[in-house]
Image (tube, rainbow, N blue to C red):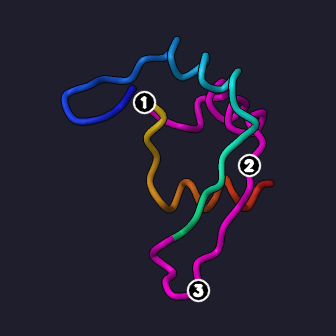
Amino acid sequence: MVGSGRSFDEPGFLAKLKEIEGYIISDVESFPNVPFWILQKTAVETWYRNGKLGAGTKISRAVALKLLESI
């Protein structure tokens, strides 16, 4: 997984997706009015398989907001 001194582990990422229902994403840059989105894991998996999440699933805030607009 991603973290200090670690690299992206695709099998681990895909295994994690099988175990969870989804994610809760927030835009803390909008504080104090913090919008949030509830994502089903299928959306994240589709974005990953279509190459929309970038290398190691890292994306910019702008890309994230664009993807979130599509759901």
70, above or below 50, in the image: below
On screen, residue 21 versus residue 34, left or right, reads right
Range covered by the magenta-colored residues: 28-54
Query: Which dot, 1 or 3, sits closer to the camera?
Result: 3
Q: Which numbered dot is residue 29? A: none
The magenta stretch spans residue 41: yes
Indicate which disc, 1 or 3, sits on the residue closer to the N terminus. Answer: 3
**Quadrant of the rendering where the N terminus is positioned:** top left
Q: Earlier in the sequence, mark 2 or mark 1?
A: 2
The residue nearer to you, when weighing 29 against 54, is 29
Q: Quadrant of residue 35?
A: bottom right
Residue placed at 44% from the left, 54% from the top? 60
Instruction: Indicate which disc, 3 or 2, sits on the residue closer to the N terminus.
Output: 3
Mark 1 Cα-neighbour bin, 10 Å: few <14, some 14–19, many ≥20: few
- Tell me the element at label 3: loop
For label 1, the residue is 55
Q: Would you place residue 2 above or below residue 60 in this image?
A: above
Residue, disc 2:
39
Q: Nearer the viewer, mark 2 or mark 1?
A: 2
Along the viewing direction, whichever of 33 and 43 lies nearer the viewer: 33
* Residue that badge 3 annotates: 33
Describe residue 58's horizontal placement relative to residue 52 as left or right: left
Tell me where residue 46 appears, x and y as whole percent.
73, 31
Q: Identity of the amino acid at label 1?
A: Ala
Looking at the image, the residue that sits furthest to the bottom is 32
Kind of residue indicated by mark 3? Asn
Residue type marked 2: Leu
Cα separation, mark 3 vs mark 2, equals: 19 Å
